Image (cartoon, grey):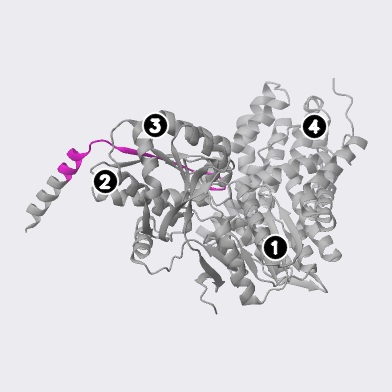
């Protein structure tokens, strides 16, 4: 086939694809694109965009094009509610991905649930998210599934007898991480020497760390976001505190090393995603992300990418009628049945039970990867 | 542990004092609560960061860039906003709210220019020297912050006390109208004060950005809240007050975290602030002004 024919065919295919568009499938994306949480929200948006572009390049879903309606919820509860309302009532999207922080999901989730629109979190790991109602979904693995494994592995490796705990107490995500750590430590019968707190925006943790140092723990358990955790590590080493850290989900960002450098050596952390996971789905994702954005993807981008793949699989299985209410309901019915093998590995949903004892929304059913920080990098922990 | 906590308190207190110097200076002279001081702080950090990373300039040039950029921004805010409000005799609240607006503009601009993520200084520029005295660890940079806070405070204090410009500034603080009648270039000194205060804010931003190695568009906000408390505590507009207020807040915060609970840090610090203001409503060094009509 010569070039001209190829081009002609290509153009024809393009025309066909265009003419085959019955209607656009509008998906709402409500993530924190500015503000402090943007370090999570921006990679998430990129993950969605990458997945959508790939799906559309292959002709969309049953001939329909995916259209992402992207809104910035700024990592704020009030803004998340506004954005949800706009997406649901004005843009009439089929479902919404987001918001970025668990705090915001607690605020905006009920809006979607009441409107019978799926709200699908890809980064909300706090407990109780999916209990809010049957329209709340997430593919982010809960801390209560990850942290017991992380702690058990670290305790075994370092022969830990007692630990100190520090966490951010004014954030739903870090507070919920702390609650899980607390329960895990009780379950595994590990004594706590002292429990310290800080608030968002703090940059000086030396008072708390000096106190921790005086109690001489074997490890420091920290439920915090990457930026704060990195500063914490640097200051701990500056004070001569040498105990290793054990972190929650907030540690899962390359940002951790940019500030902490080698201060984080030996830190244990659990993650639903491993960038080195050799499965073809993950390797494809990592390569495609790097090519499109010129940066390393992180866990949040991977989960967003998988989330859109999950939604696409559900959309593929339903017949789109063009009536928004009907299509939203059909999508809601189809989502729980989806199981995929994506960048984060094999995935399926697990229905949660609401506070009233009735079946509620859906959580992720996945096994975590355990990492240890070596030479300023996350290395998959293999028992050594 | 106590010695280390006292050192921690001294460095944290100096950080607060350093930030509050320019903040209180503007209030003392212009009688404006300039809430854009946090943005000056941030701008200084970014200016220095840009100069040292993009132009590969040494840190000394970074300090100059921080002073110059923040100073000029302070000047621009004065010339574009505060001066106009002064000319219209706007009530006190108006310039305060206008500077909130200026802050929003500047932080959004910084988010657009530099992105929302935390930026950091290159490793080789970070003074990593550390001193260990017994069980006490202090980094060279922390000592520098303490030293610079005291140095700037003393310099500013002496300038205000013993130079012609200082006397002129104090005359303005007393009564701008009377000062103008005496032939003092009031507008010129207002501009100079705004420049100086913002430049001080810029240096504070750079030092603190270096110390915590974290520069973000929003970095000025949390410290602004503490700065307001420090300035009120020290006595609005008083240079010594900024230093002692800063140290007081630092010590109250650290010691309550150390000996009560880390949840109580702010509660104790601000509780004490409240108590002190009950006894001394004008703050530690402030005088209650009664001559105002």
Q: Is residue B115 visible?
A: no
Q: Which residue is drawn at 89% across and 25% down?
A: B290
Label placed on residue A50: none
- Which residue position holds label 2? A60
Label disc, if present, on residue B172 of the rendered structure: 4
Q: Is mark 3 on a helix, strand or loop?
A: loop
A196 relative position to A359: left or right: right
Q: Name the chain under label 4.
A: B
- Distance of mark 3 from mark 4, alpha carbons? 57 Å
- Judge the density around disc 1: few (<14), some (14-19), many (≥20) Cα neighbours within 10 Å: few
Residue A116 visible in this rendered orientation of the protein: yes
Name the residue tied to disc 1. Answer: A186
Residues at marks 3 and 1, CA–CA distance in whole angstroms: 47 Å
User: In which quarter of the view is residue A185 placed?
Assistant: bottom right
Q: Marks 2 and 3: in contact by CB < 8 Å?
A: no
Which tag, 3 or 1, sits closer to the chain's start? 3
Rounded to the nearest angstrom, the CA distance separating label 4 from label 1 is: 64 Å
Q: Nearer the viewer, mark 2 or mark 1?
A: 1
Magenta span covers which residues?
A14-37
Mark 3 surroundings within 10 Å by alpha-carbon count, few (fewer than 14), some (14 through 19), many (20 or more): some
Q: How far across and down, in percent of the image, does residue A225 sit?
A: 60, 55
Q: What element carries label 2?
A: loop
In the rendered structure, which disc, 3 or 2, sits on the residue that comes first in sequence? 2
Q: x, y percentage for residue B136?
A: 81, 69
Task: Reply yes or no: does residue A26 show up in magenta.
Answer: yes
Determine which of the numbered discs, if any, sits on residue A91 in the image. Answer: 3
Mark 4 surroundings within 10 Å by alpha-carbon count, few (fewer than 14), some (14 through 19), many (20 or more): many
User: Where in the figure is residue B76, as x and y percent of width and height?
Assistant: 60, 37
């Amino acid at each position: 086939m010569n070039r001209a024919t190829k081009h002609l065919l290509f153009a024809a295919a393009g025309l066909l694809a265009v003419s085959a568009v019955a209607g656009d499938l509008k998906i709402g994306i409500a993530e924190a694109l500015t503000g402090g949480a943007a370090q999570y929200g921006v990679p998430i948006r990129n993950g969605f965009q990458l997945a959508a572009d790939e799906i559309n390049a292959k002709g969309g879903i049953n001939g329909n094009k995916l259209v992402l309606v992207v809104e910035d919820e700024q990592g704020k509860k009030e803004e998340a509610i506004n954005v949800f309302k706009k997406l649901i009532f004005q843009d009439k999207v089929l479902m919404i991905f987001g918001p970025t922080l668990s705090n915001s999901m607690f605020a905006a989730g009920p809006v979607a649930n009441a409107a019978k629109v799926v709200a699908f979190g890809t980064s909300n790991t706090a407990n109780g998210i999916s209990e809010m109602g049957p329209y709340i979904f997430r593919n982010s693995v809960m801390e209560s599934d990850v942290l017991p494994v992380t702690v058990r592995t670290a305790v075994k490796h370092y022969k830990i007898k007692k630990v100190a705990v520090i966490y951010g107490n004014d954030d739903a995500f870090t507070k919920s991480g702390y609650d899980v750590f607390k329960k895990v430590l009780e379950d595994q019968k590990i004594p706590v020497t002292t429990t310290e707190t800080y608030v968002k925006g703090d940059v000086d943790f030396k008072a708390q760390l000096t106190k921790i140092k005086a109690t001489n723990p074997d490890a420091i358990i920290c439920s915090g976001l990457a930026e704060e955790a990195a500063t914490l590590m640097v200051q701990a080493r500056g004070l001569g505190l040498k105990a290793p850290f054990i972190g929650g989900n907030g540690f899962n960002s390359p940002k951790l090393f940019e500030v902490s450098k080698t201060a984080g050596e030996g830190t244990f952390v659990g993650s639903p995603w491993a960038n080195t996971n050799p499965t073809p789905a993950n390797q494809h994702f990592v390569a495609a992300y790097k090519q499109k954005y010129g940066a390393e993807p992180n866990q949040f981008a991977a989960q967003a990418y998988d989330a859109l793949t999950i939604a696409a699989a559900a959309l593929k299985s339903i017949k789109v009628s063009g009536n928004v209410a009907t299509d939203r309901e059909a999508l809601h019915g189809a989502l729980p049945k989806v199981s995929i093998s994506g960048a984060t590995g094999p995935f399926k949903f697990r229905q949660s039970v609401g506070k009233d004892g009735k079946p509620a929304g859906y959580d992720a059913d996945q096994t975590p990867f355990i990492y240890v920080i070596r030479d300023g990098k996350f290395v998959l922990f293999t028992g050594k | 542990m106590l010695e280390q906590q006292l050192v921690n308190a001294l460095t944290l207190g100096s950080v607060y004092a350093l930030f509050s110097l320019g903040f209180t200076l503007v209030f003392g002279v212009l009688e404006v609560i300039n809430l854009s001081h946090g943005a000056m702080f941030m701008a200084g950090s970014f200016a220095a960061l840009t100069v040292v990373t993009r132009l590969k300039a040494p840190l000394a040039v970074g300090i100059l860039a921080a002073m110059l950029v923040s100073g000029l921004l302070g000047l621009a805010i004065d010339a574009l906003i505060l001066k106009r409000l002064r000319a219209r005799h706007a009530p006190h609240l108006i310039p305060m709210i206008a500077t909130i607006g200026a802050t929003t503009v500047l932080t959004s601009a910084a988010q657009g220019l530099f992105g929302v993520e935390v930026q950091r200084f290159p490793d080789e520029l970070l003074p990593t020297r550390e001193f260990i005295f017994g069980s006490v660890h202090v980094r060279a940079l922390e000592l520098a912050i303490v030293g610079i806070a005291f140095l700037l405070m003393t310099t500013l204090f002496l300038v205000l006390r013993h130079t012609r410009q200082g006397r002129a500034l104090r005359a303005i603080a007393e009564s701008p109208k009377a000062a103008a009648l005496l032939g003092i270039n009031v507008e010129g000194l207002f501009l100079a004060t705004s420049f100086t205060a913002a430049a001080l804010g810029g240096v504070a931003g750079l030092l603190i950005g270096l110390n915590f190695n974290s520069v973000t568009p929003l970095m000025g906000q949390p410290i602004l809240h503490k700065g307001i408390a420090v300035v009120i505590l020290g006595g609005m507009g008083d240079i010594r007050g900024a230093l002692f207020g800063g140290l007081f807040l630092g010590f109250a915060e650290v010691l309550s975290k150390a000996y009560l609970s880390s949840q109580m840090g702010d509660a104790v610090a601000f509780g004490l602030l409240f108590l002190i203001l009950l006894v001394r409503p004008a703050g530690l060094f402030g005088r209650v002004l009664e001559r105002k009509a």
